[in-house]
Every structure is written in structure tokens, then in C-alpha cells.
Amino acid sequence: MTAPALDKPIPDLEVQATSERNFKLSDLQGQNLVLYFYPKDHTSGCATEGRDFRDHYAEFQKLNCEILGVSRDSLRTHENFRSKQEFPFDLISDGDESLCKLFDVIHEKTMYGKKHMGVVRSTFVIDDKGVLRKEFRKVKVAGHVEEVLEAVRAL
């Protein structure tokens, strides 16, 4: 499957999400979509990013935009994280890394001097026709959600 490219339709994959949702990405056509990839549930940076999306969720909804977070964590861990942080949006469990690989967000990272393969924080803005319109890679959490909101407003 070909990686998503700007101004091209995203490939259709079936995903598993919290709230017992199993669906294809194409099921979301008709609304804009923010797909944000993050390294790990229950970590400070990931919680902060999720809370920022949570706190702006009503603004995204007014723009006919859904938000979905993606990490390699299990659905059980996602449900706990989502509940604890009071996220109004679902989280996708990508345990087999198919979505992460498709969007090319797994890269070598260094933590405490050791190299490992991990999810690089990234966000993708997809329009209501399923076309990738904007990508943010190597995201810094501070101010990021406001940037994404501006990109959605520009659709």
C-alpha cells in the first residue's frame, strides 16, 4: 500500500478504536479528520497533547472535524488513558503498526542514550473527501493544536 501523499486520497484501512469502534477510514468521509500519532499512553507529553485536543474539541467539531489519536498501545490501555484524561474522541490501537507504517511515523529514536524504534509525534489533516491536506512531523506539543486548528479552518 502506498504511503499517503499531500493532495492525494489516503489509503483505506480498517482500524480498531476505543468505544468498541471498528471501522474503515473511508467511513469518515463527509467530515474532516485530524489523525494524530503519539508515542505512548499515560506519558506526560502524550497526555498534554491529548488534553490540548480535548480542550479545543468543540472548535474542531464546529468545523465538521473529527479527531482520532493513534498509538501502538492496546485498546484496554487506550480506554484507561481516554477515561482518565476525559478525551471526547476515540483512540486507535495500532498494535500491528500497519497505520504507523503507512504514515511513516516509526523511526529510530534515542532515549537515555539507547536507540530504539518508536513513534515520532505526527499529525495529519484529511479533508471531507479523504484527501491528505496537511502533515505535521516531529511535532512539539506546545502550540501544536492551535496550528492544527488553523489548518482545519483553511480547508
Image (cartoon, grey):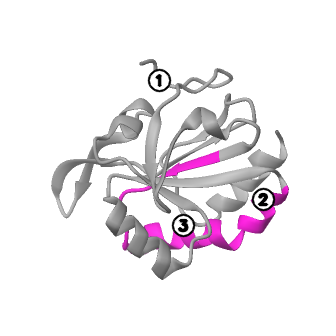
Residue wearing tag 3? 49
**Which residue is rendered at x = 63% and y = 23% of the image?**
9
Judge by depth and name the residue closer to the eye, 143 or 82. 82
Q: CA distance from mark 1 to mark 3?
A: 25 Å
Left or right, 133 with reference to 26: right
Residue wearing tag 2? 61
In the image, the segment drawn in magenta is 34-62
Residue 3: assigned label: 1
Looking at the rendering, which quadrant does residue 136 occupy? top right
| Between marks 2 and 1 in the image, the one whose residue lies nearer the viewer | 2
Query: Is 59 part of what is drawn in magenta?
Result: yes
Crowd rating for badge 2 (residues with CA inside 10 Å; few <14, some 14–19, many 20+): few
**In the image, residue 144 above or below residue 108:** below
Magenta segment, principal secondary structure? helix
Name the amino acid, label 3: Glu
Determine whether the residue tagged by mark 1 lies in a helix, strand or loop. Answer: loop
